[in-house]
Structures are given as C-alpha cells and as structure tokens.
Image (cartoon, coloured by chain):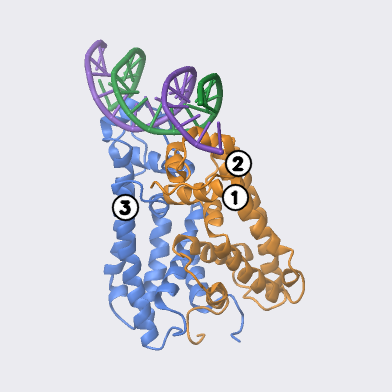
Chain colours: A orange, B blue, C green, D purple
Amino acid sequence: MTTARRDTYTPETLLSVAVQVFNERGYDGTSMEHLSKAAGISKSSIYHHVAGKEELLRRAVSRALDGLFAVLEEPGALRGRAVERVEYVTRRTVEVLLAELPYVTLLLRVRGNTRTERWALERRREFDHAVADLLKAAAAEGDLRADVDSRLATRLLFGMVNSLVEWYRPYPGADHSQLADAVVHMAFDGLRTSTT
Amino acid sequence: MTTARRDTYTPETLLSVAVQVFNERGYDGTSMEHLSKAAGISKSSIYHHVAGKEELLRRAVSRALDGLFAVLEEPGALRGRAVERVEYVTRRTVEVLLAELPYVTLLLRVRGNTRTERWALERRREFDHAVADLLKAAAAEGDLRADVDSRLATRLLFGMVNSLVEWYRPYPGADHSQLADAVVHMAFDGLRTSTT
DNA sequence: GTCTATATTACGATAGAC
DNA sequence: GTCTATCGTAATATAGAC
C-alpha cells in the first residue's frame, strides 16, 4: 500500500491519492492511517492540506458532478431532435465517466451517511431527472419505444453506463469514444441481430 | 420462507435485520451498535447468535450467490438455442435479484477488504464468466450481434441488470416478471423504435 | 437469551516541535 | 510541511450476572 513519496503535496495531488484508496477499500473502509501510508506522509500532515476525510470526499464528488452537469450544457445536448440529444448525452456521459473515472466511481458509491454524501445523492438525482425528461421527449417524438416508462428506461440506461466504473481500467492510448459507441449502440439498438 | 417476527432471534431472523442496515449504511459504515439498535437487542446478545459482523456478511452473500448459481442449473439455461438460454438466464437473474433483493444488493457492493468479501467477488466472477460463454455461443450461432465483444456485452448486460438494486423497492403484489420483461426487452432490442 | 460492564484496539483529529 | 505524541471517542468483542 505504501507508495513512493513525492516532493510535496497540494490538496489536488493528495486528492488523487485519496480517491484511489477510497475506491479500493470503500470510503468508510478507509482510515486516515490508510491514506497516510498510501501518500507516504503522516496522518497529521494530511490535515495540513485538508480539513479532514470528508473534505476529500467532497472535493472528489464535486469534480465528478461538475463534469457530468457540464455535458447537459453542451450544444449537442441542447439542439436537435430529442433522440439525438439523448444519444449525445449518453455518449458524452460515458466519455466523462471514463475521463474522470476515479472521481465518478467514488460518486456512484456514495451511500448517504453524511451531509456531503446526501448532497451528492441529491445532485445525482437532478442529473438523472434531466436525462429522464430528454428520454420522455424522445418517446413523445416517436423515436424511442413508448411501451417502457421513461423513468425506468433512464434507470436502466444509466445502470448500464455507470456499471463501467466496476470493471473499466484505463490503459495508455485507450480509445474512449469507441467504448462509448459500443455502449450507445447496445442501449439504443440492443444485443439482437434482428428485431422480432 | 417465514418472515414472521419471533419472540427471540435466530441467526436467520437476525440476518434479515442486519442486511437491511448494511444496505442502508454500507457494511463498513455499520457498527454493531447500529445493528443492536435496529434489532432491539444489545450488542452482546448479537454475539450469542453469530460469531460477529463478518459472519452476517458471509451468510448474506452466500444466500445471494446460491440463488444466482441455481439459475444456471435450471432446464431453461441448459437446453435450446444459446440466444434463448441467454434470455432465460437474464430474465431469471432479474427475478432472483428481485426475490432476494437485500442479499443480492449486499453481494454487489462488497469491495474485497476481507477474505469473505474476496471469496464473494471470486464467485461473482465465475457466474459472469458462465454467462459470457453463453453470449459468445449465441453470437456464434448468429442470433446476437457479433461486432461487440462477448465479455463487454456481458458486462453491460449485467451492469443494467444489477443496477436494479440501486433503486427498486418491492411493494405488496409487485409483478417481478413484468419488470424482468422490460429489462430483457431493452437489453436485447434496445430503446429505439426502429433500427437504423 | 438477554443484559450491564468492560477490555482492547482503532479511529479522526489536534498540539506543538523542528 | 512534516513529524512524533497524544487526546477523546467509537469500534469489535468478551465476561459474567440473571
């Protein structure tokens, strides 16, 4: 668990170490002792950079949420037919998830035990609702199946997207857009070769 | 399966209380004090029924794993075209997940911090691998898309299925087969009305 | 079977030297 | 900025009465 020590830490560089440990052991399963060993500095040195464990969590989930909400403001999410906007948001959500993998991973595992965690859950709900509205509009325009509730479809869609954090591990030169294509294709066209 | 509250606890009735608290607070975020208050007995009384916190986790994930692996032995998973077997296993997995919701929920959240958790993760991998083999066979028979890797397809499929534990809450008279239909339909035929 | 009381360790966080 | 030392609390688990 102990890693090589760096020159000096900033809140940001310390955060990257902490998030990695949080994701390996779980937030509640990670002690300040675990963090200090992973960072190569003492427990008290960590408190020089951040107020405590929960601030590290807050910084991490904030970064993830900022990335996700920014997608909703991009032109591709605001213009065109609803179905195209849904596909765009889905694809970009995958890309943000992969680009900010450790931070989004931590966000998706928050349980709600502290105020910070409950705030994160609330913001996630806002994001999901925005996408659910898009799905509903796409169904109303006749481009998406109307026999499945939009809320259910959104949940299944993001269940699939979010599950990427459970197994995807980046490698040098990884092509995120290709994986995003596969996810969008499966979500909108399904696994089967021909519809029955 | 009896759910009636008894005068005194057995390991099984205590387990149902513990699993509920584990799922609300997370396993690591749950103390024996939390469990004792939820069960209405003292901490030391819990130790009369089980050896400790980890035994409760082991019993819970074992129950979930037994339910999932049993699906693979059912006739529908062993006979017929591969694509039909995949659909059958998917549908039955959803049904087992919903029938044993608290136990499967806990299983899907283990991180691997203890030996019990690592054993659970290993068994989950075995299950996923069995389904990936089925998917590969279905693609080889031409019934499933061949342009998506079978392991990737399996991961996305079960990402969607497993995400049910994040939001589904049972209610009296709930129709699990209907939800299972919706999941299978979305996974195999997609969200779109017409393929492009 | 359940309780109170307690042993023992681990945890988050702080104090103060350098 | 980092350290050692430590505080106060909360954790898992046990002892022994009833």
Query: For the residue marked with disc 2, what is the amino acid?
Result: Thr
Can you give x and y, in whole percent of width and height, for residue A51 in the image?
A: 59, 35
Mark 3–mark 2 distance (CA, rounded to whole Å): 29 Å
Q: Amino acid at mark 1?
A: Val
Quadrant of res A34? top left
- Which one is nearer the viewer's eye here, A167 or A145? A167
Residue A116: mark: 2
Residue shown at 47%/39% (left/top)?
A41
In contact (CB < 8 Å): disc 1 and disc 2? yes
Q: In front of the other: label 1 or label 2?
A: 1
Q: Chain of mark 2?
A: A
- Name the residue beneath numbered marker 1: A61
Q: Are marks 3 and 1 on the same chain?
A: no
Q: Nearer the viewer, residue B22 or A43?
A: A43
Place of residue A97 in the rendered image (x, y in percent of width and height, measured from the top left): 57, 62
Gap in angstroms between the C-alphas marked 1 and 2: 9 Å
Task: Name the residue nearer the viewer: B172 or B24.
Answer: B24
Residue A48 image point, x, y percent: 57, 35
Query: Tag on residue B118?
Result: 3
Callout 3: chain? B
